[in-house]
Structure formats: C-alpha cells, structure tokens
Amino acid sequence: MEFSTSISDNMNYLNNKLDVDANFDIVHRTFYVGDKLACLYCIEGFTKNDVWQKLMEDFSSLTPEDMLIDVQEFSKKHFPYTQVSLVKDEFTMIKNLLSGLSCLFIDGYDKCLVVDSRNYPTRSVSEPEKDKVLRGSRDGFVETLTFNTALIRRRIRDPKLTIEITNAGESSHTDIAICYFKGRVDEKLLEKIKELIKTVKVDALTMNQESLAECIYPHKWFNPFPKFKYSERPDTTAASLLEGNIVIMVDNSPSAMILPSSVFDIIEEADDYYFPPVTGTYLRLSRFLISILTLFLTPTWLLFMQNSDMIPSWLQFIKLSEIPQVPLLFQLLIFEFAIDGLRLAAVNTPSMLTTPLSVIAGIVLGEYSVKSGWFNSETMLYMSFVTVANYTQSSFELGYAFKFMRMIMLITTAMFNVWGFVGGVLLTVCAVVFNKTIAGKSYIYPLIPFQLSELKKRLFRGRLPHKAK
C-alpha cells in the first residue's frame, strides 16, 4: 500500500496496523510544521531524544510559506539532518520503524520522511572472553551491528572494503552485513553467498549466525567438523578480509562468520601474529600437535590396555597400577559426559560461588572417585589432560568435533580391538578429507591438493611482506 497526501488517512491506517494503543513502546506524537499537521512515529528506547528536540526547534521557526514546496525540496531545505530518506509504501516504512528508525508524516505529502536517529542499547566494547590474546588489541565485537562494522572500518581505511546490508527472516527481518574486499574476494563465491541469503525462507533467525549458517549450508549436517570460522575479534576479521575472505555479520550476534574456512584457518589464532615469527611458529605447531593428541590419546591408551603385550618396554609405566572395578571404556565415556556436565554447570554458576564449588568438585570428584573404585587414577590423568588441552584452540565447534570422533574411536576400539581402532582412525580421516568448504574446495587445502609453498605458510609463521617504496 502506498501513502496518501491525507495525514489523517495515513494515521488511521498505521494506528490500526501498529496497534499503538496496545504497544506502549510505539510512540506517536502530533505537532505542526508551519501550518501543516505532522505526526512522528518512533520506538521508545531506540531514539535519540536530543536529536528530535533540536529538529522540533527548527520546525517551529518555519512559516506557512516555507511549506509551499514538495516533500523532496522540504527534506533538502528544511531538514537539518544527514540521514534522511523518503519512503512511499507502508511495508518499507513499518520495517524501518521496527528497526529503530523514526518516521515523520506531514499533511499534504504522500511520502514518509525516515530519519535514522537510532540509539541501540549496547554494552561497552571489551576483550572477548573466549578469543583472548597474550598481546594485541583488547577490543571485541558487541551485539550492535553498526558498532561492529565501525570496528572493522577503523582498521581498513580503503574504499575497496565493501559492507553490504540485507536482511532475512519473515518476522524478524534481521539485519545481515556482507563484508568483502573488492579485487581480492572470489566473485563467484560472493554471488553464491548473496543468492543463498536472498533465498533463505525462515520466520526468524532465532539463533542468529547459527540459524543463518544452517540455512546457507544445509549439506552434510552429520559431519561434526565446522564449515565456518567464528571470531569475536575485529583484528582477526580485518585480516581475513584482506586475505580475500568473506565476512558475514548478523545483528544481535557479537561475532563474525568467516568463509570459506579450512581446518587450518579454524585452528589459527591472533597470538600467532602478535609475536615474532619464531614464537608464532612455536605456538602454532604446539596447538596443532596438542589438538592431535586430544584426539588420539585416550583411544591409543585404551588399545594398549587391551593389548598389554603391544606396550614397548620404555612405556611400561602407562599400565594400570590397580585392577579396574569398572571397564575402562565406561570410565572414559563417563568422564566425557561428566566434563560437559561440569562445563554446563560452570556456565550457570554465579561468579561468587565459582571458587568454593570448584574446590568442592575437585575434592569430591578427584580424590573420592578414585578411592571408591569408580575410576582409576590413570584414567583421570589422561582425561584431565584431554580436557585442559581442548582449550588450546578457540573454536568450540572444532573441539566438539574432536570429542565426537574420539568417543567413536573409543567405542570401536573397545568392541573390535585393533581393527576397531584402525576403523575409527579411518572414519576420522574420511570425515576431514571428504569435508568441503562452502566454496566446494578441499577442507584440508593445501594438503589436498598438495601445495608445498602454501603448506609452509600454514605451518610456519613467516615475516609479513613489505612493499618496496
């Protein structure tokens, strides 16, 4: 529906459509601009009151002669504000209003003046809890999209950086920003991503980025290895854009979705680049090796315990010091589930109770679980290492992928011994090798297809390139 020149008709329609009598936060106020009646619609809590106070002071000085112009000329001559647009249809106007923009109607004009005077509630910019660094920037993304894009613009001051805005969700109309660097981005992949977002048919992005990720990449849901890299750090996001990646940011989500991403991209961290090349290489290789250890440590130990004759003489100390009362497989699986239970409990525990409850949990679960015969001390040692080592890389998704594959290897090893271990390893390798990025390329490039020069860059932190003057 298009608006008419009669403000009373427009107000009657919108008051009924928006149900302004029932919605206390939808504010509508009438006043005069020159000799014409005007009506302002806005959302309480989203609008900068001082902006409209100043605008109304300017409107009060207008005379009837000043209003003898069309709405286009009025917005240019008598509207002292930068972000003003004209909207003719009610669908666009309502979507803008519910997004936080203010909408002004003036009698005699068949268009609505949409003013971006938003003031979203937001928390202050601070370092992300998960993506912390030993050295480097201490700022992180927040839940407000415009703040997040500003943090990227602050780092890349180049007109080739493009940030396009779109939305998805028939009810939520959630804002989505697509960021890329012209000249470096894969144009075919960019068009594919835009088309996928346009064709998303959901009522609302209730889980923000995860909802969008499941919509644009619905294939191979059973493969636990992540298809996207998530980062709450503006510096990491800016570096990815400069490398030619595409970044998708969703309003109300304090992280960026980086694609396409291989397993090497996901394991990388900002600390690799905030230290000299030797230190950065050490940190990167350590993280790679520890990630592999978390995957294979407990299944390999279980295999050795089931075949003690396979243990070499220099590894005899890994044998059990006591006969297990509970089968080792059940001990390891119970620990896998118990660790997630403790993690969930820690998330929901008030901060003031974290320390005393941690002490109690350490005493009860540590000492008495061994004394009661439920667990062997060796089992607790290896599972403790796996639990702590999982936090060496920041991706929760990759950590849980390793966890699921480790549990599968434990079960197959317990059931089929050596062949079960080999089968579990092959299944894990296939899950990684046959996984694809959203661009359809290999998940473990540059291993497959093999490219030595790129593999060296992934494993070893070199010096940053410098352009000659």
Image: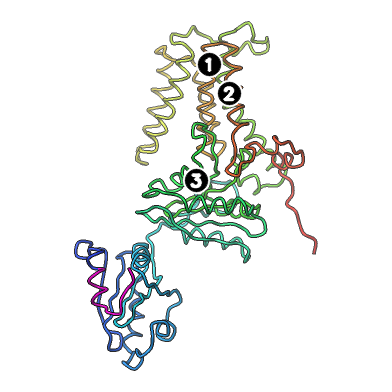
Measuring from the top left, give residue 147's x and y in whole percent: 47, 60
* Crowdedness near tag 2: few (<14), some (14–19) or many (≥20) residues, C-alpha within 10 Å: some
Please, what is the three-letter code of the amino acid marked with disc 3? Ile
Q: What residue do we see at 36% from left, 49% from top?
A: 203
Instruction: Looking at this view, name the residue that lies furthest to the bottom.
Output: 65
The magenta region covers 1-14
Quarter of the image for residue 386 reads: top right
Answer above or below: position of 327 versus 181.
above
| Placement of the C terminus among the 4 image quadrants | bottom right
- Where is mark 2, residue-wise? 427
| Placement of the N terminus among the 4 image quadrants | bottom left
Mark 2 and mark 3: Cα distance apart in space = 26 Å
Mark 1 and mark 2: Cα distance apart in space = 10 Å
Answer above or below: position of 196 versus 388.
below
Q: Which mark is residue 216?
A: 3
Please, what is the three-letter code of the amino acid marked with disc 1? Thr
Label 2 residue SS? helix
Q: Which mark is residue 198?
A: none
Answer above or below: position of 415 versus 69.
above
Label 3 residue SS? helix
Q: What residue do we see at 37% from left, 33% from top?
A: 345
Q: Are marks 1 and 2 in contact (CB under 8 Å)?
A: yes
Q: What residue do we see at 34% from left, 54% from top?
A: 171
Q: Which mark is residue 412?
A: 1
The residue nearer to you, when weighing 141 against 257, is 257
Viewer-nearest of labels 2 and 3? 3
